[in-house]
Amino acid sequence: MHFRDLDESQLLALAITAEEEDGRIFRDFAETLRKDFPATAELFMRMAGEESDHRHRLIDVYRRRFGEHIPLIRRQDVKGFLVRRSSWLTRTLRPEKAREEAALMEIEARHFYEAAAQRATDASVRQLLGDLAHEEQKHEKAALEMHEAQSAAGDLDRESDAARRLFVLRFVQPGLAGLMDGSVSTLAPLFAAAFATGNTTDTFKVGLAASVGAGISMGFAEALSDDGKLSGRGAPWLRGVVCGLMTTIGGIGHTLPYLIHDFRVATSIAVVVVVVELTAISWIRWRYMDTKLLAATFQVVVGGVLVFIAGWLIGAG
């Protein structure tokens, strides 16, 4: 259905449904964010209350003009509206992304009311739609003012710290554990195979098998270790995927050079890749885990060198 084909009753019915949907989305945002980001949750509850007020005013006008039955006309039934992802599918939501989504929703609502008011011929309907367009514009300004007030009070700084902690718990920690395991634990079998066979193809197969096997093992271990309900570490399957992928990536990095047929060249490049991987792990530990850079580097490098030596001795023995 085209927007231009809607009559006044359909315009009002669409507006009522849109306000109901926006109110639900704002409440969903608030419930998702309430535990870790109470200031942003408060903002969305206020916005949901305003959407509810709009809905009541629209229903009152509709009832006076067209009776009690309100047909179900949704945004997706009319061409020109953005299709929104259902808010209940969002398991993890960052405050800044929720604010951006809300701002887009308010802008879209204002444009709709402005266009609908131009099509309305009844004075009461036209006035209401125009008033709502003006109020949606004020909502954008009010949300910005509330954001600035919460920022001045330090609420957003606290939420930013909480978001960083959650990011570390849900992504950095499982990813780092996987990267360390993949980069370090696969060194011994890879270089043992390399120095035992001197064959790059066989070495590549051993490294690939070790990397994939370690990724699967680490992924399941992380997913089954904690359901995230008490620790706040998020969905176990997501942590498992992150950990498993990073484990595989950590092992694949120094395995790929053995696609080169020259054994000396392949081994030299693999050693360089190992150094880069260990440096990256040290930086991540320093950047996100509050570990001193020198200590992080020493711990990771010593561990990597010991595993490398073990693989070399076993393969050359």
Image: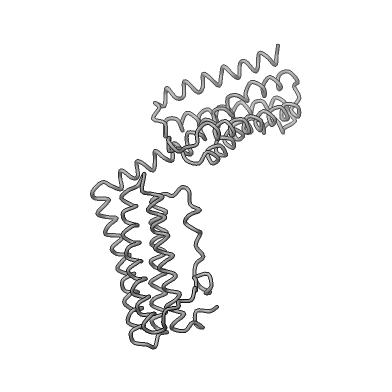
> Residue 257: percent from the left, percent from the top?
67, 32
Residue 42 figure quarter: bottom left
Tell me where residue 276 appears, x and y as whole percent: 54, 30
Residue 14 place in picture, x, y as percent:
45, 74
- As drawn, the residue found furthest toward the top would be 317
> Which residue shows up at 72% across the image and 32% down it?
260
Residue shown at the point (50%, 53%) measured from the top left: 89
Q: How many marks?
A: 0
- Classify 90 as above or below 256: below
Which residue is pictured at 53% across the width and 73% down the height?
77
Q: Is residue 169 left or right of residue 46?
A: right
Which quarter of the picture shows residue 217? top right
Residue 252 position in % (x across, y down): 64, 33
Q: 65 above or below 212?
A: below
Is the residue 59 above or below the residue 187 in the image?
A: below
Quarter of image, res 21: bottom left
Residue closer to the observer: 250 or 2: 2
Q: Quadrant of the C terminus?
A: top right
Q: How is the image coloured?
A: one colour
Most distant residue in the front direction: 68
